Image (cartoon, rainbow, N blue to C red):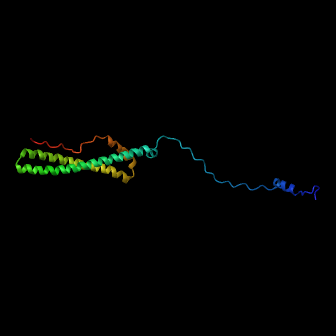
Amino acid sequence: MPRHGFSTHWRTHALAHLFAAPSPAPIPRPVAPPPARRENHGVTLETILASPVLGLLALLGGAALVYRLGRTVLRLGIAAAEKTAIDGMVEVSIRHGDLTTMAERKAHVAAVRRARWRAGLLTLLWASLLVIPAVLDVTRPVYALAALAWLLPRRPLRFTPAPSTRE
């Protein structure tokens, strides 16, 4: 026993770590490289398509297309009703033997027929601008461009002027 009554074991134990074999090195873990800094090369198509401004323009463009489609469908209905009414008046003019009024009304029928064709083609145009982009999945940019339709002049609902009445 040592002279102070303490075991020398604590000294050997305390110094053992200095003379012990080195512990194995920690296994390196793969570290992902830091994300590369993307250079700002300006505006890309993806950033434009994701912008809220384009979304708002697309909403306005879709509303413009629906509005234009509604007006042309209404024009188409008015032209069909007008043609039916004028055809009846032409028959009345023929029965009465009024050749002048009959000729005027036939010219009016031809004008209404042209207006109906035009309204039909415009209806097809506006409907296709609403449907085709949705099928092709390009609604956002096409509808945003369609917002310019609000700037187009509006035509009256009737393509043809009302026929003059004879007094």
> Is 128 or 32 nearer to us in this picture?
128
Q: Residue furthest bottom?
A: 1
Q: Residue furthest front?
A: 167
| Rendered location of residue 75, percent (x, y) | 24, 48
Q: Residue furthest right?
A: 3
Residue depicted at x 27% and y 49%: 123
Picture layout, residue 19 above or below residue 105 = below
Q: Would you say 72 lies left or right of 146 here?
A: left
> Is 35 or 144 nearer to us in this picture?
144
Residue depicted at x 30% and y 46%: 68
Place residue 9 in its image quadrant: bottom right
Q: Would you say 123 lies left or right of 27 here?
A: left
| Rendered location of residue 40, percent (x, y) | 51, 41
| Rendered location of residue 132, percent (x, y) | 34, 52
Residue depicted at x 11% and y 44%: 104
Picture layout, residue 6 above or below residue 75 = below
| Rendered location of residue 6, percent (x, y) | 90, 57
Q: Quadrant of the C terminus?
A: top left
